[in-house]
Image (cartoon, coloured by chain):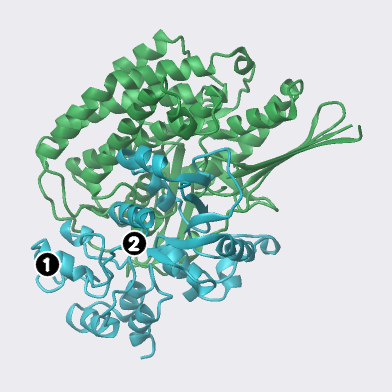
């Protein structure tokens, strides 16, 4: 059987998620033995045209050019993977969607606006069908390996969809929200990171986007009424990594309405 | 022949999207050499306005996956400066170590994954790994890069996006045992760091590179006490000597049509170079003893104005980073948890750190509620783009005898020698060469 052909593409993002592939140092040579890395501009000078078996796309779509490229990528592959929170939900670049018109956003940074072609930032499934999501800012290396193994075996990868709280409890961490009175978003955020931040005494910032059983409105209330965050603070919390998702939109708009 | 056109795809093995357009006249002169950068702008400076000051370091580390820590630490220090926050010696040491780990990861990535394939005639490190003679070097290089990554994991919980460093300090500190394990591995890799420097020298010793010298202003941080990493005064080979917070007045940016990155000049002067070559040139005497010794062994003399020698400078800095990390770990001993507490105040602050590829500047104004009013970010590659164009204008006429394919490769190599982190600012490249006449 021929090795599956893999392509890696980058839209608006920091390149950290595709760097994560190179950060699999100890598995890298094994992976390169099992798949054919056909297109990976960050790592290779010779890159080959599709079609590909698996296309990994990093970054949010924020320009018409990226949107056109995304459509071609979708047509040119069997399995399309959103690599990281920017590709999954719009990520950090999506913050700009909620701070005024695109023109206002541009005027703060650039003087010659005719040159700038930027549209609202969305995850790739806003435009095309996506087959798998590797969440997180940046992606979790364990999940990346799990995905590649599953793809090679032709089985569905096992990703967690419950909240970070589940993983945090398994680690027997003291609850940052209840005991530490810190604005931790673990209860609404999708697991898979091993509760990385709370385990390091850092409140979860929701970088993996909403969990399946997300109750963002209730957490927004807790943040404001019990922890004393200002309403603006609460809105900022839900509009950071996944402000585009319907679930986190509920958290952000809970106090914006008022 | 009326016109000679060369079209090359992306300049690979960098991060981000961009292109280089060159028009060469019949007389062999460059009529135009310009970067066209189409990496989509992400408007960090715009959306940071209205965010809380403690979110700035968390968000700006997401500007670049290759050098997240310099962005993060510049922003942390700028916020601390704005609000008058003093941090402990331990925090300063942890930050120092964090950036050294970033240098190790990024320099190892650059030397072996991004640059070496060019010099050895491979399209990528994948090809190098296929050669049984080179495979052990590739494996060792992977270990080296992993060590840099593990320094980040031990200090911050993650290879790329740090989870512990915040305004005021760290939410959690590594235990001494974990640091001592890193120390052992650093000692174990030292010989390979020296070998890397020798290899870098061998790769660049071809006569074709010796000629490619262009004297330009080199800019780097300088500290009184150490080879500057996290802070210092900003100095240059042409006599610039200013405090960190003065950079907005001296390092000027211009918006260039057709290009999402801005062009950088020094007030009243011209383009300049930042990065490992500038640092080694300006701070040679503060490198570790072994880093200075290896430089002498391979015959590297400062100042060196050949940009292709940046790969050698990276080798020298790898040796220094290993030595300096060991020293820093010894100074840290058994780190103790310190609560990163601070009071929010209105203020303005600017700070600079040395990213692997050069100075990374952050700063702005915060109101009394801790909300950002203005934030300025200049990534190192943004400083270098204009200088790269000037290099091309000078060097390409010397390389006209080369075939289109060779010429394109040399141009790509020049650009890669700056290790442009294109996500930061200007982004991968496509080289278009048009020869007229």
Residue at the spot of label 2: A155
Q: Quadrant of the C terminus of chain B?
A: top right
Between A114 and B150, the one lying in front of the other is B150
Between B230 and B237, the one lying in front of the other is B230
Residue at the spot of label 1: A169
The alpha-carbon separation of the residues under discs 2 and 1 comes to 29 Å
Between B22 and B268, the one lying in front of the other is B22
Residue B284 screen position, x and y as percent: 40, 20
Residue at the outermost right position: B2
Chain B, chosen colour in render = green
Q: Residue at x 43, y 75 (%)?
A: A244
Disc number placed over residue A135 in the picture, else none: none
Residue A8 screen position, x and y as percent: 49, 51
Callout 1: helix, strand or loop?
Answer: helix
> Would residue B180 be found to the left or right of residue A57 on screen?
left
Chain A, chosen colour in render = cyan
Callout 2: helix, strand or loop?
Answer: loop
Q: Earlier in the sequence, mark 2 or mark 1?
A: 2
Residue B35 screen position, x and y as percent: 66, 43
Quarter-of-image position of residue B212: top right
Is residue B308 something that shows in the picture? yes
Q: Quadrant of the N terminus of chain B?
A: top right
Q: Residue at x 28, y 53 (%)?
A: A142
């Amino acid at each position: 059987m021929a090795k599956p052909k893999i392509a890696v593409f980058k839209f608006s993002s920091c390149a950290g998620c595709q760097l994560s592939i190179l950060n699999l140092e100890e598995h890298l040579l094994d992976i390169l033995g099992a798949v054919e890395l056909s297109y990976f501009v960050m790592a290779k000078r010779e890159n080959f045209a599709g079609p590909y078996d698996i296309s990994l796309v990093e970054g949010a779509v924020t320009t018409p050019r990226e949107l056109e490229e995304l459509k071609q990528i979708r047509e040119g592959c069997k399995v399309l993977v959103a690599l990281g929170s920017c590709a999954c939900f719009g990520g950090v670049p999506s913050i700009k969607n909620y701070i005024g018109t695109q023109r206002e956003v541009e005027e703060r940074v650039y003087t010659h606006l005719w040159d700038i072609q930027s549209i609202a930032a969305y995850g790739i499934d806003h435009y095309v069908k996506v087959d798998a999501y590797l969440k997180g800012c940046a992606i979790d290396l364990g999940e990346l390996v799990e995905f590649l193994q599953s793809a090679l075996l032709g089985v569905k990868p096992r990703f967690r969809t419950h909240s970070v709280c589940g993983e945090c409890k398994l680690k027997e961490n003291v609850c940052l929200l209840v005991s530490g009175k810190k604005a931790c978003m673990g209860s609404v955020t999708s697991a898979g990171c091993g509760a990385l931040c709370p385990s390091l005494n850092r409140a979860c910032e929701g970088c993996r986007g909403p969990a399946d059983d997300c109750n963002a409105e209730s957490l927004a209330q807790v943040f404001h009424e019990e922890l004393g965050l200002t309403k603006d603070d609460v809105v900022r919390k839900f509009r950071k990594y996944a402000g585009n998702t319907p679930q986190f939109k509920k958290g952000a708009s809970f106090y914006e309405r008022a | 022949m009326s016109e000679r056109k060369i079209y090359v795809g992306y300049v690979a093995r960098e991060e981000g999207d961009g292109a280089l357009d060159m028009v060469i006249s019949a007389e062999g002169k460059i009529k135009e050499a310009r970067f066209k950068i189409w990496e989509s702008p992400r408007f960090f400076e715009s959306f940071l306005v209205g965010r809380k000051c403690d979110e700035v370091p968390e968000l700006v580390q997401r500007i670049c996956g290759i050098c997240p820590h310099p962005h993060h630490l510049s922003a942390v220090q700028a916020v601390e400066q704005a609000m008058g926050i003093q941090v402990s010696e331990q925090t300063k040491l942890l930050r120092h170590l964090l950036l050294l780990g970033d240098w190790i990861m990024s320099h190892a990535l650059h030397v072996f994954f991004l640059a070496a394939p060019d010099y050895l005639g491979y399209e990528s490190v994948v090809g190098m790994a296929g050669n049984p003679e080179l495979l052990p070097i590739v494996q060792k290089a992977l270990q080296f890069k992993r060590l840099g990554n593990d320094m980040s994991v031990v200090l911050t919980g993650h290879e790329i996006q740090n989870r512990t460093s915040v305004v005021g300090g760290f939410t959690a500190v590594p235990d001494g045992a974990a640091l001592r394990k890193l120390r052992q591995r650093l000692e174990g890799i030292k010989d390979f760091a020296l070998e890397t420097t020798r290899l870098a020298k061998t790769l660049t010793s071809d006569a074709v590179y010796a000629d490619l010298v262009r004297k330009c202003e080199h800019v780097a941080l300088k500290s009184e006490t150490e080879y500057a990493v996290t802070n210092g005064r900003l100095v240059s080979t042409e006599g610039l000597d200013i405090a960190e917070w003065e950079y907005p007045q001296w390092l000027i940016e211009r918006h260039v049509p057709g290009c999402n990155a801005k062009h950088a000049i020094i007030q009243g002067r011209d383009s300049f170079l930042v990065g490992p070559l500038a640092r080694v040139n300006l701070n040679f005497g503060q490198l570790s003893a072994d880093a200075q010794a290896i430089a002498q062994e391979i015959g590297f003399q400062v100042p060196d104005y050949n940009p292709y020698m940046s790969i050698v400078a990276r080798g020298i800095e790898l040796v220094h980073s290993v030595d300096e990390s060991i020293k820093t770990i010894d100074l840290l001993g058994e780190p103790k948890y310190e609560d990163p507490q601070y009071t929010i105040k209105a203020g303005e602050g600017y700070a600079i750190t040395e990213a692997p590829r050069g100075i990374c500047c952050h700063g702005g104004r915060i109101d009394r509620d801790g909300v950002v009013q203005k934030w300025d970010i200049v990534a190192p590659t943004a400083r270098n783009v204009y200088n790269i164009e000037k290099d091309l204008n000078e060097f390409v006429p010397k390389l006209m005898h080369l075939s289109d394919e060779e010429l394109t490769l040399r141009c790509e190599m020049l650009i890669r020698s700056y290790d442009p982190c294109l996500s930061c600012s200007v982004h991968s490249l496509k080289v278009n060469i048009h020869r007229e006449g």
